[in-house]
Amino acid sequence: MNKSFRFLSIITISALAFLLLNVIGKDNIPFLKNVSEKYEIKAVKIPAYLELAGERVPTERADVREKMDRELLVNTYWQSNGLLVIKRANKIFPILEPLLVKYGLPDDFKYLAVAESALLVNNPSHARASGLWHFLPSTAREKRFKLEVNKNVDERYNIEKSTAAAAIYLKRAKEKFGSWTLAAASYNCGMGRVSERLRNQQVTTYYDALLPDETERYIYRILALKEVMSNPEKYGFVFDQEDLYQPEETYTVKVDTAITNIASFAKGFGITYKELKRHNPWLREGKLNNKSRKLYEIKIPQ
């Protein structure tokens, strides 16, 4: 831009400003704001008492308060994600909660599942972790977890079976560390790494240990999700019951043979291939090989 053109531009802007002030009037010029007039960015107040699975969070400590504040702010003001997980929870928690009771996990661990997958069952992470509990393929295939993972069947996407596998891990970690909080932390970075950090740093609790960066945030993220999702109105999330995703009624068909064509199989129950795969994302191909004659349970929508 040459100097004369820049000078003319300045004159033009100045003239417009003069016109607004003297012709329209100063009081009639609207204050420009990028968001609604009612929208405010407020600091969140950290609750006086927080716990994870009955274990108190030492919120009197400055470092704990700062980390908790960060996660509460992120999960309060990432509004789209917050509202989506609240909507999904209405659909997924009724399935998940009785499974946690069945497999002996505290109810708070449903928020660990939220932290892992945002309750998106069929949405792999960048590290190839999949399912509600985000198991890696190598971990899921371990004998103790009893999950079948191959191109044809991937039981990481089966809510019931993957929850049973997560319970096996978390209960073993609780036995090892004597703490549900440390068990949850180890779900993020592994029991070996947590044990090593505790031993080398000569500490015994999550809040005293210096852990990998992601694990440093992990427990606070779970706590923030629990707080916000348990008290949505307190954090500005407004919705009607009809806005929430609703549970869908299904019944179970047991199959111990191969299915050569899942589209034809679905059609036999009056549903589409897409509907059957939506309720059974662990079926990864258009057929079920089942050479071993294993008994599978397939959900059919009502």
Image (tube, rainbow, N blue to C red):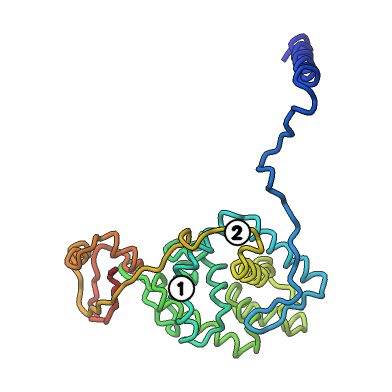
> Quick one: which residue is furthest to the top in this view?
4
Where is residue 101 shown, x and y percent of the image? 49, 85
Residue 138 — which label? Answer: 1
Where is residue 269 shown, x and y percent of the image? 20, 68
Q: How much space separates mark 2 and mark 1, taking CA atoms? A: 38 Å
Where is residue 169 shown, x and y percent of the image? 52, 82
In which quadrant will I find the C terminus? bottom left
Q: Nearer the viewer, residue 259 or 25?
A: 25
Question: Is residue 210 something one can see in this rendering?
Answer: yes
Left or right of residue 168, residue 206 in this image = right
Give the residue at x 53% y 62%: 85
Left or right of residue 89, residue 290 in this image = left
Does 212 appear above or below 55?
above
Give the residue at x 44% y 66%: 121
Of tags 2 and 1, the one toward the viewer is 2
- In the structure shown, which secondary structural element does the residue marked by tag 1 occupy? helix
Q: Quadrant of residue 265?
A: bottom left
Q: Nearer the viewer, residue 207 or 197?
A: 207
Does 199 appear above or below 111?
below
- In the structure shown, which secondary structural element does the residue marked by tag 2 occupy? loop
Q: Nearer the viewer, residue 131 or 201?
A: 131
Marks 2 & 1, CB-CB < 8 Å contact: no
Q: Quadrant of residue 122?
A: bottom left
Mark 2 residue crowding within 10 angstroms, few (<14) / some (14–19) / many (20+) = some
Indicate which disc, 2 or 1, sits on the residue closer to the N terminus.
1
Question: Is residue 135 something one can see in this rendering?
Answer: no
Give the residue at x 44% y 70%: 137
* Circle 2 residue: 237
Left or right of residue 146, residue 129 in this image = right
Mark 1 residue crowding within 10 angstroms, few (<14) / some (14–19) / many (20+) = few
Where is residue 1 shown, x and y percent of the image? 72, 15
Amino acid under label 2?
A: Phe
